[in-house]
Image (spheres, rainbow, N blue to C red):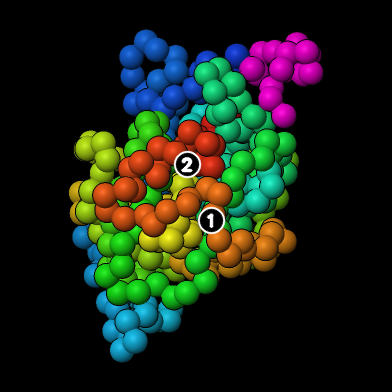
Amino acid sequence: MIFRPERLGLVGFALVFILAFVFHGMGDNAGGDPSRREAQRRPPIVQQAQVGRPTPNRSPAGDLAPISSNDPTVQIEPSKKGNSTGTAFSIGDGIWMTARHVLEGCTAFGIITGPKRVERGLRAMLNLSHDLAVFHTQRQTAPLGFEQAALKRGQDAFHFGYPQGKPADVRSTLLGRMNVTHGGHWGGRGRRGIGGPRTKEPVIAWAEVKRVPAFTGSLGGISGGPVVDADGKVIGVTVAGSPRRGRIFTTAPAGLRHMLTLAGTPARSSSYGAVNQTVDPQKFPRIGAALRKNLTVAKVICRVD
């Protein structure tokens, strides 16, 4: 449901202006434009010098080997919870997936559907074992399906969303497995945390190959965005990055399965309707633009009181 003053009364009217004007667009917390004052939701990586190399792909079949206790671990420090934006994508009829840290601490959140228009997010479920969340809206858009096959050594991935609050796409190649450890809190009004305590979370490490349009600096704001393979099927959700090293971290396939099971949402086997052609290094920017235009991929805004 669109936030409308006539439906929410005086309090809702104020919220419309806060969400549609203050949160619309992502910025660098500088300057006089109120639409540029919110932060990008992304947990920065710390202890860079302690980070080992991702576990390489050694499966003789070319598949990424199973999760191992020997996978290296990187620590992610808690991000400051404030008014912010991220990315989400449609996985069903009015059902959306994003990163958990995009919704943590939000007292109100939604997706931007047009200039000064926000669709309210409802019934958020935060996964405490993986950096994933699912929420609902009354608006329905073409959903993405999920890949069931194993990840392959050296395969391409395509990340869609709103890095630095602006529409952009990233191509990467698979490096290997890692773990991340999280800190911080979760929750907010109307938020449910489920899935067990947060300890080490398995992730997949990717090497950046290309950004379209070309830009430098943080990928903050692409958190929660879908990562798809050549068939346009989801193989991960972008959750963190190390710009200095050109690394992107995404949820592991096991995390996706866990989130879908907890949410009671079946994984669609195809992205047809949202992605109707092969995603490749030449076409991925056009496909990303179409996904955002059709609101299969949307910008999330979060209000923190």
x, y percent for residue 60: 31, 89
Q: Which mark is residue 291?
A: 2
Q: Image quadrant for the C terminus?
A: top right
x, y percent for residue 279: 37, 55
Amino acid type at circle 1 is Ser
Which residue bears the numbered disc 1? 271
Q: Which mark is residue 302?
A: none
Residue 9 is drawn in which quadrant? top right
Residue plotted at (29% across, 84% down): 58
x, y percent for residue 295: 54, 37
Residue 70 is drawn in which quadrant? bottom left
Q: Main secondary structure of the magenta part?
A: helix
Q: Is residue 292 visible?
A: yes
Q: Is residue 100 visible?
A: no
Mark 1: few/some/many CA within 10 Å (<14, 14-19, 20+): many
Q: Are marks 1 and 2 in contact (CB under 8 Å)?
A: no
Q: Secondary structure at mark 1?
A: loop
Segment colored magenta: 1-16
Mark 2: few/some/many CA within 10 Å (<14, 14-19, 20+): many
Q: Image quadrant for the N terminus?
A: top right
Q: Within the magenta stretch, is there residue 9?
A: yes
How far apart are the two marked residues, 1 and 2, measured between alpha carbons? 11 Å
Amino acid type at circle 2 is Leu
Residue plotted at (43% across, 81% down): 66
Residue plotted at (52% across, 18% down): 115
